[in-house]
């Protein structure tokens, strides 16, 4: 499987999502984030976009976001229980298994996801994580977890030129949770969990500053 090629395609998709303004409908607003959605072209569900400004440099925000085993993300992100590295393909491309806890008061059972993730930096200082589902021989479906599928998703940390201690953060979630979940549960879960994601991230970045 050409993990590098798949990951590069995802990076292109995410950048195109930030540039294409058409069809997004706002479904949640908080002090931290505006969450919008539109029908996905990848699967019969929605793609969700989060957009907000985080107090902290792109490097600090990225330190909290980056997908690594035992990194900061598993400490503050309520939807990530653990990251397991399955294969390091290149310096920037890896295959991970992500385990998520049960959610929505137990209606959503624990899930696991196998994704190729590309970390890509752009010349203007933008840092991105780009992920999508792949198969991996070392990680067949496991009992106790519903295997979910992430379609192109990730985070884009964009520097704000006049304010070096602030970061514009786009996040995209495009996830087939699998299992037989009522559509209403899925449609209410993503906007609220993304709002929580931004507020918990802001706290995590603040805690970095305090050290």
Image: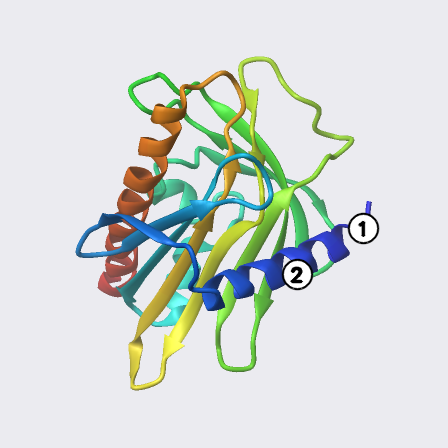
Specify whether 72 is left or right of 191.
Answer: right
Q: CA distance from mark 1 to mark 2?
A: 14 Å
Q: Are dots 1 and 2 in contact, CB under 8 Å? A: no
Q: Looking at the picture, tell me which residue is in the foreground, 21 or 97.
A: 21
The residue to which callout 2 is attached is: 92
Task: Give the x, y percent position of residue 178.
Answer: 54, 24
Q: Secondary structure at mark 2?
A: loop
Q: Residue at x 48, y 73 (%)?
A: 126
State the quadrant of the C terminus. Answer: bottom left
Relative to 133, residue 178 above or below = above
The residue to which callout 1 is attached is: 2
Task: Give the x, y percent position of residue 210.
Answer: 22, 62
Task: Give the x, y percent position of residue 82.
Answer: 49, 35
Q: Residue at x 30, y 68 (%)?
A: 56
Q: Secondary structure at mark 1?
A: loop
Q: Looking at the picture, tell me which residue is in the foreground, 106 or 185.
A: 185
Q: Residue at x 52, y 44 (%)?
A: 40
Residue lying at the far top in this picture: please name it.
143
Task: Give the x, y percent position of residue 179.
Answer: 52, 18
Sequence order check, earlier mark of 1 and 2? 1
**In terms of image quadrants, where is residue 136?**
top right
Dot 1 crowding, Cα within 10 Å, few <14, some 14–19, many 20+? few
Dot 2 crowding, Cα within 10 Å, few <14, some 14–19, many 20+? some
Q: Looking at the picture, tell me which residue is in the foreground, 57 or 20.
A: 20
State the quadrant of the N terminus. Answer: top right
Residue lying at the far right in this picture: please name it.
1
* Closer mark to the observer between disc 1 and disc 2: 1
Residue lying at the far front in this picture: please name it.
23
The label shown at residue 86 is none
Q: Residue at x 40, y 19 (%)?
A: 182
Specify whether 142 is left or right of 107.
Answer: right
């Amino acid at each position: 499987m050409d993990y590098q090629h798949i990951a590069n395609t995802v990076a292109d998709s995410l950048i195109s999502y930030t540039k294409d303004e058409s069809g997004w409908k706002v479904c949640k607003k908080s002090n931290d984030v505006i969450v919008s959605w539109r029908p996905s072209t990848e699967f019969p569900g929605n793609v969700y976009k989060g957009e907000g400004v985080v107090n902290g440099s792109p490097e600090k925000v990225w330190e909290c976001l980056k997908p690594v085993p035992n990194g900061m993300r598993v400490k503050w992100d309520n939807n990530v229980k653990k990251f397991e590295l399955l294969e390091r393909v290149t310096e920037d491309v890896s295959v991970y298994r992500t385990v998520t806890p049960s959610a929505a008061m137990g209606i959503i059972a624990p899930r696991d996801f196998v994704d190729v993730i590309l970390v890509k930096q752009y010349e203007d200082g933008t840092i991105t994580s780009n992920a999508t589902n792949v198969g991996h021989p070392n990680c067949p479906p496991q009992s106790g977890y519903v295997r979910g599928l992430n379609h192109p998703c990730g985070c884009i940390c964009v520097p704000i030129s006049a304010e070096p201690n602030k970061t514009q953060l786009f996040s995209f979630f495009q996830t087939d949770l699998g299992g037989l979940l009522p559509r209403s549960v899925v449609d209410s879960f993503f906007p609220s969990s993304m709002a929580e994601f931004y507020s918990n991230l802001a706290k995590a970045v603040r805690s970095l500053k305090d050290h």
